[in-house]
Amino acid sequence: MCLAKGMKEYLFFSLLLVLSTAGGVVLYTLYYYNFVSADFETPIVGVFVMLLYGVLAAVVAAVGTVVVVIKDRIAEKRVSKGVGV
């Protein structure tokens, strides 16, 4: 598990999550279509699953981004007040 130290790292890790999810679903759909079932609806179902995974990853990234922003702002306020981190 990677822990982001700042906003840029978190956005980078979120982008990697979305890209790896999309790539994994595309590879799985290709495998399923070529080796298991060559039905006409297989690519459609694969795209639907990829969209669901993509939306889920985007929601997780958005919530995490909000959490990281709030954490960074609280840390900035503590530093500016001299409280310490």
Image (tube, rainbow, N blue to C red):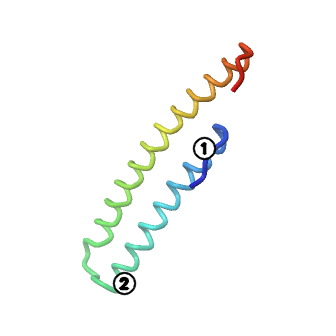
Which residue occupies the foreground of this view, 36 or 44? Answer: 36
Q: Is residue 22 rendered to the left or right of residue 68?
A: left
Rendering coords of residue 71 (x, y %) = 58, 29
Tag in front: 1 or 2: 1
Which residue occupies the foreground of this view, 26 or 81? Answer: 81
Which amino acid, mark 1?
Tyr
Q: Is residue 8 rendered to the left or right of residue 57?
A: right
Residue indicated by mark 1: 10
The residue lying at 34 percent from left, 54 percent from top is 52
Image height check: is 48 above or below 6? below
The residue lying at 66 percent from left, 17 percent from top is 77
Which amino acid, mark 2?
Asn
Q: In the rendered view of the protein, which quadrant contains the C terminus? A: top right
Residue indicated by mark 2: 34
Rendering coords of residue 63 (x, y %) = 46, 37
Q: Residue furthest bottom?
A: 35
Which residue occupies the foreground of this view, 12 or 79? Answer: 79
Res 16 → quadrant: bottom right
Decide: few, some or many residues near mark 1? Use Cα within 10 Å; few <14, some 14-19, many ≥20.
some
